[in-house]
Amino acid sequence: MSDERTISRRNMLILGGVAVAAAALPASFRLLERETGSLADELLAMLADPAGAAVIGRQLIETSGPEKQKAVAAKIAKRLRTHGWQPGGTPDEMRAALAARIRHDFEHGEMIDVAGWQMARTSAELCALAAVHHEPQHAAPAVTHS
């Protein structure tokens, strides 16, 4: 006879899986929050001169149509993931992925014209992100790309 208090191997595996998934949820929420909440700030922290980048970014915005700040930050982050960066990574990991992505843009002709200058797409979008970020109180949260 089986004791009613015993748990089958199947139920134990299911409960174990649920426990692992439940334990992972807080980390997932932190990564999602980090990716959507402070992603722009993390990207802008990579710039040596955010104000100078904003000047270039404003020129790009003037010549192209607007796009939401979060959308551009998400596009940049997606490209960085192809070069090994993950949300929640260190600034050094982001910097390395950003450098690799900019090299990739140059190697594959992914360039944007900004006032007669050819820039890597990722660099140009990062400048546009800086321009929007440095707007007074983020009045016009839009950046562009072509």
Image: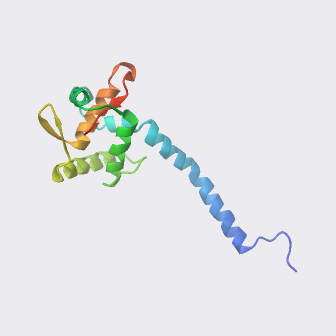
The C terminus, quarter of image = top left
- Is 123 positioned to the left or the right of 69 in the image? left
Farthest residue toward the left?
Answer: 116
The image position of residue 97, as x and y in percent, is 29, 50
Residue drawn at 29 percent across, 32 percent down: 65
- Is 54 positioned to the left or the right of 136 in the image? left
Q: Is residue 47 visible?
A: no
Farthest residue toward the bottom?
Answer: 1
Farthest residue toward the top?
Answer: 136
Please determine whether, in this image, residue 142 is positioned above or below residue 31.
above
Residue 120, picture quadrant: top left
Q: Is residue 121 visible?
A: yes
The N terminus, quarter of image = bottom right
Please determine whether, in this image, residue 60 is positioned above or below residue 122.
above
Please determine whether, in this image, residue 127 is positioned above or below residue 80.
above
In the foreground, 61 or 1: 61
Farthest residue toward the right?
Answer: 1
The image position of residue 137, as x and y in percent, is 39, 20
The image position of residue 68, as x and y in percent, is 38, 33
In the foreground, 138 or 12: 138
Residue drawn at 35 percent across, 44 percent down: 75
- Colour mapping: rainbow
Residue drawn at 40 percent across, 36 percent down: 70
The image position of residue 130, as x and y in percent, is 30, 30
Residue drawn at 44 percent across, 42 percent down: 35
Residue 145, picture quadrant: top left
- Is 139 positioned to the left or the right of 118 in the image? right
Please determine whether, in this image, residue 109 is positioned above or below residue 7.
above
Residue 63, picture quadrant: top left
